[in-house]
Image (tube, rainbow, N blue to C red):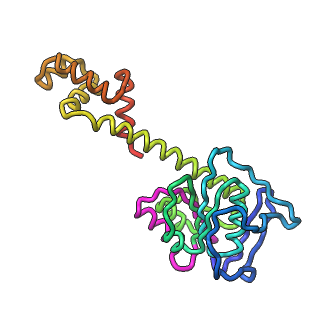
Amino acid sequence: MNSDALVMCSSNNVCLHFSSDTRRSDEDYSPDLGPDSGDPTLASATGNTTDVTIPAIETRPTIHFVEDDSILCELGRDLFQSAGYEVAIYQTAENFLNAPRPTDDACLVVDMSLPGMTGLMLLETLQAEGCDLPSIMLTGHDDAKTAVAALKAGAHDFIEKPADSSVLINSVAEALEHARVMRAQVQERDHAMACFDALTPRENDVLEGMLDGKPNKIIAAGLEISQRTVEYHRASVMSKTGASSLTALVQLYLTATRKI
């Protein structure tokens, strides 16, 4: 990114162009977490402020923006704040890795070309850690190989510059929503797994017969136990899992064994 001319476009297709000679020194540029920094509003050449729709959500997710260009840091911060997000800015991938990992509702927006560790290397590092932070990769070059590598490294989207602001904001919103859905599915699966983990080995034997739709008499014969004992274990399975019916038990089992 150090030699690329960069363009950020508003939703009405008015673009701002920044070439390498407009860049400020990166010295003493610290991460920002608040809206009161006095940065310029992303605007058109006539000075009209870009209109961005604020997401209809109760909390304010944090956008972690990793970008080495100071001017673009300011523009990105203003854009994301205008869309209703908190913003944390880092000018190197190393600075992001040295900070605590986000634990709240958050999204990573990272430039591909960074000094030192690249954006792709950052995503690969987070993936190796098992960090499931949703991420958007920005690049100045449309490289299919790099795009595939970024998606394999866990990027939700791969956006070529110049990026239209509405496209970027929509991509971030989609990444955050996808992450929320995945978290909910994981929690649901973990709860279901905990229900079945509470079963004894014999209850699991009876459960297997129940899931196969076998009547108590057939289950008892297969396990060489009395039908009364099967009925006892069957009632225990229903109680421990909280299932109100056989159909609910099957649905709970499918949730517990679902791959995410």
Instruction: Between residue 107 and residue 123, name the one nearer to us.
Output: 107
Quadrant occupied by the N terminus: bottom right
Query: Can you give x and y, in whole percent of width and height, for residue 233 in the image?
Result: 22, 24
Residue positioned 43% across, 39% down in the render: 188
Does the image show residue 206?
Answer: yes
Q: Position of residue 106 (x, y in %)?
A: 56, 56
Q: Nearer the viewer, residue 175 or 199?
A: 199
Magenta-tinted stretch:
113-140
Quadrant of residue 8 within the rendered picture: bottom right
**133, above or below 59, in the image:** below
The answer to whether residue 211 is magenta is no
Tell me: residue 101, above or below residue 248.
below
The quadrant where residue 259 appears: top left
8 versus 56 height, above or below: below
Residue at image point 68% right, 83% down? 25
Q: 130 left or right of 42? A: left
Residue appearing at x 57%, y 52% in the figure: 175
Residue 190: percent from the left, percent from the top? 38, 42
Q: Position of residue 118 (x, y in %)?
A: 53, 74
